[in-house]
Image (spheres, rainbow, N blue to C red):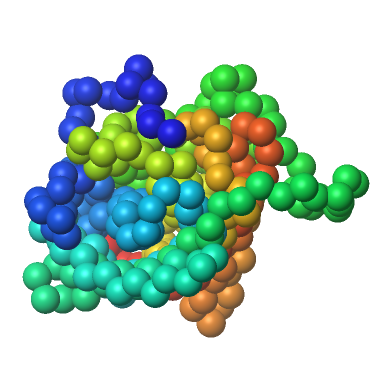
Amino acid sequence: MAQDESTRDESHPAVYTAQGDDAWLPGPSSRGPWDPRAQHGGAPAALLVHVAERAAPGPGWQLARLTLELVKPVPLAPLVTRTQVQSARSTVRVGIDLLAGEVLVARAHALLLASQSLALPPGLPGWPQEPLRPLPRDCTQHVRIPGLPEGESFYSTAMETRVAEGDSTRPGPCSAWFRLAVPLLHGATTSPAMRAAAAADFGNGLSWVLPVDRYLFTNADLSMNLFRVPQGEWIGLRSASEVHGGGAGLVVSHLFDEQGPIGIATQTLVLRERSPGA
């Protein structure tokens, strides 16, 4: 489903521009919160979903899983992808390396399933998460995470946000809706799975529990499972973080569209104390 042109902010270019079949140029709206030279994880996550979906042998395939390893900070610099594809009757498995020059910065594994319509028995137990409410049109508060820098970035420029449950300015679980405000890839349709991946990486910041002025809590990966294709432009996250004094943490985000649950995402956190005066 193509993104509604009326929601795009034409004052900002797309997050990425293709430079050939397997080369990509990130724009300023891909920038992340930790380093002005590095991208937000949601940007390459959505880009690699595009690469995976492009590898399908034809129409009728849907992304069921994306596992993204953020090996190094993904720079705001020209990138290339190298892809390996294994196809079967009902599955397509895609391995993708993302490189800056010859340096591996991220690695993804995607699983696509052949879509089919099933006549399921009535009354089956459902996903144990209630739909996320209120809906985006009934939410007025934007996501605001204390300590994050302002300026052009994936967080403040590329994404429109609405808080649904909790308070993003205070520590603890929180739920919010996310919608891409600019095209992800210049001249290309933003697919439902791309929208889901772009939003799924926000769980860490949305459900923060450590003060950003004293700690770093970057996610080293993102795993996303979708059991149905998202409908509409808005992706909801109901997120909660757990941290431990040993230096590791975990974020679990249940994913939604306006009709109800669509899947789940997890992130492994690397916790570090900031140096005094940093």
Return the residue nearer the eye: 138 or 224: 224
Rendered-image quadrant of the C terminus: bottom left
Residue lying furthest top: 6
Whether residue 205 is visible: no
> Which residue appears farthest toward the right when viewing the image?
123
- In the rendered image, the vertical position of residue 47 relative to residue 170, given as above or below: below
Residue in view at x 61 percent, y 66 percent: 242
Could you tell me which residue is drawn at 22 percent across and 23 percent down?
10
In the rendered image, the quadrant that contains the N terminus is top left
Q: Which residue does the image show at 32% across and 37% down from the upper left?
A: 189
Could you say where residue 39 lies in the image, as x and y percent from the top left? 26, 55
Q: Is residue 230 visible?
A: yes
**Residue 262 picture location, percent across and down:** 62, 47
> Picture quarter containing residue 229?
top right
State whether residue 123 is above or below residue 165: below
Q: Position of residue 160 (x, y in %)?
A: 41, 31
| Left or right for 187, reference 232 | left
Q: Using the rendered view, name the quadrant where residue 271 is placed.
A: bottom left
Residue at image position (9%, 51%) is: 19
Nearer to me, 17 or 191: 191
State the image quarter where residue 4 is shown: top left
All told, the count of numbered labels is: 0
Q: Residue 172: percent from the left, percent from the top?
A: 62, 51
Q: Residue furthest bottom?
A: 246
Please indicate whether residue 188 sits to the left or right of residue 232 in the image: left
